[in-house]
Image (spheres, helix red, strand yellow):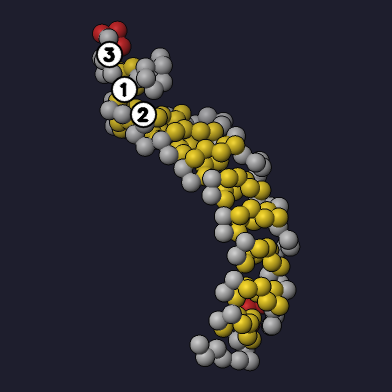
Amino acid sequence: MRMSPASRHSGFILLAALLPFVYFQKSVTGQQCRGYWYDTRRYMCCADYELCLRGTRILHDCCGKHCYSEGNSICCSGRLVDKCSQFHASCCGYRCYKADMELCCDGVIVKRCAKNAECCGTECIDARRFICCEGRVLPRCAPGDSAACCGDRCYDKTQQICDL
């Protein structure tokens, strides 16, 4: 980018391409973004491409090389996605899901089936009642952590030994 004489003033540089009409001064706290100095106390640089303003009421973050508002969007695998829930938004691949009501099971969004829900492949299971052994949903054979998998079978660790 070629700069006109009016855009340079004793140590200040106008970053017209990034933030129009904002001047930056090379300082101890400065770094470069796309070759231009910026104040790291007021801005952050996303992958040496775009500047985000810090310290505002709206939280900003980087998603890849772009700045975004965390109030409206979520960054899923480097892509910006509209937030699907104000407080419980999570990512499943490139999609947003409501983590309080859904699970992401092997890249598939499924309805949460129980308070203690877990995934078994692409299925939701109640982990208090079932255990997932090598992708198979089995009735839990012992309470709590005593139940474990031995291959594709459930066994009670306190009573049995897995010899696989």
Q: Position of residue 40 (x, y in %)?
A: 37, 33
Question: Residue 25: x percent and y percent?
Answer: 31, 22
Any mark on residue 59, and which? none
* Crowd around label 2: few <14 · some 14–19 · many ≥20 (10 Å): some
The answer to whether 5 is drawn above or below residue 157 in the figure is above
> Dividing the picture into quarters, in which one does residue 149 lie?
bottom right
Residue 41 visible in this rendered orientation of the protein = no
Query: Which is nearer the eye, 19 or 162?
Result: 162
Q: Are marks 3 and 1 in contact (CB under 8 Å)?
A: no
Indicate which disc residue 25 carries.
1
Q: Which residue is mark 2?
A: 39
For mark 1, give the secondary structure: strand
Q: Measuring 73% from the left and 61% from the top, which residue is drawn there?
A: 113
Q: Which mark is residue 3?
A: 3
Give the quadrant of residue 85: top right
Tag 1 or tag 3, which sits nearer the N-term? 3
Q: Three-letter amino acid code at disc 1?
A: Gln
Tag 3: amino acid? Met
Residue type, mark 2 in image = Asp
* Residue at the extreme top of the image, as rendered: 6
In the image: residue 17, left or right of residue 108: left
Q: Say left or right for 58 vs 5.
A: right
CA distance for labels 1 and 2: 7 Å
Crowding around mark 3 (Cα neighbors within 10 Å: few <14, some 14 to 19, many 20+) is few
Local SS, label 2? strand
Q: Position of residue 135 (x, y in %)?
A: 59, 71
Q: Residues within 10 Å of mark 1 (few under 14, many from 20)?
A: some
Quadrant into which the N terminus falls:
top left
Q: Is residue 49 left or right of residue 74?
A: left
Task: Report the side of 93 relative to 114 (left or right).
Answer: left
- At a point 55% along the width and 81% down the height, the residue shown is 151
